[in-house]
Image (spheres, rainbow, N blue to C red):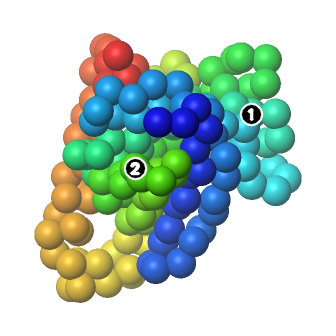
Amino acid sequence: MTDHLTVTLTKAGRTKIRYPAALVADTGDRISVRAPWAADGVRDFGFVRFEPGDVFTEHFWRTRWYAVKEVRTGEGVLKGWYCDITRPAVVEDGGILVEDLDLDLWVSADGASVLRLDEDEFAASGLGESDPHAAAEAVRALDALAAQAHTPEGLPALLT
C-alpha cells in the first residue's frame, strides 16, 4: 500500500469532500491516516473550531460503522475527537471511501463534553425507511461510541 492516500467522504450519493492523507498504520481492519484540516477557512461549531493548521489523525474501520478523528492544533495540543457515523470504509486503489450517515459525536480533549450531533438530520434523511439495516447500524454505532467516551479509558482505547 502507498504511504499517501486520498480520503473521499460521500453523503447521499455525492462527494462531500476529498483530500490527501498520509498513511500512519493499517492493521487489516483499522486504517489510520494523518491530514491537515482540509476544508476552506475556519469551521466554528460553537463547542470547537476547526481551522487551518489543525491536524487530524483519522481512524477508519473496514468492519465498523464509524470513523474516529483525533483533532490537534498545529502545535500538537489535543482539541478532542470528532466521530463520523459511516458505513464501513472501503480501502482500494490508493484511497479510502467512506459514506457519511449524518450522525456525529464530539468528545472534548478532557472527555467532559460528549455531544451527539445531527440526530435531526439523520431522522430527516429517510435512511430508516430506505435502508433500515444501515439506519439501525448507525444508531448502534453512535450509542457504542458515546458509551465508550464515557468510560475512564475514553475513545483512545479504540485506537490502540
Position in image of residue 50 (x %, y %): 72, 43
Residue placed at 83% from the left, 41% from the top?
52
Q: Which of 22 and 102 is in front in this view?
A: 22
Q: Considering depth in this image, is 144 or 8 the residue closer to the camera?
A: 8
Q: Characterize the local packing of mark 2: few (<14), some (14-19) or many (20 or more) Cα atoms within 10 angstroms.
A: some
Residue 129 is drawn in which quadrant? bottom left
Q: Is residue 153 above or below residue 25?
A: above
Quadrant (top left, top right, bottom left, bottom right) of the C terminus: top left
The quarter of the displayed image where residue 56 is located: top right
Q: Residue at x 72, y 43 (%)?
A: 37
57 sits to left or right of 116: right
Mark 2 lies on a secondary structure that is strand
Looking at the picture, tell me which residue is in the foreground, 64 or 149. 64
Question: What amino acid is labelled 2 in the image?
Answer: Val
Mark 2 — residue?
Answer: 91
In the rendered image, is residue 115 in sight?
Answer: no
Q: In this view, does 50 lie to the left or right of 104?
A: right
Asked if residue 54 lies left or right of residue 56, the reply is right
Of circles 1 and 2, which is in front?
Answer: 2
Question: Where does residue 113 sit, x and y in percent of width and height?
Answer: 48, 32
Under tag 1, what secondary structure? loop
Q: Residue at x 52, y 48 (%)?
A: 94
How far is the residue under mark 1 from the one under mark 2?
24 Å
Q: Which amino acid does label 1 sit on?
A: Asp
Q: Can residue 32 be seen in this view?
A: yes
Kindly identify which numbered label has been placed on residue 77.
Answer: none
For disc 1, the marked residue is 54
Where residue 98 sits in the image (x, y, percent)? 43, 58
Above or below for 67 versus 140: above
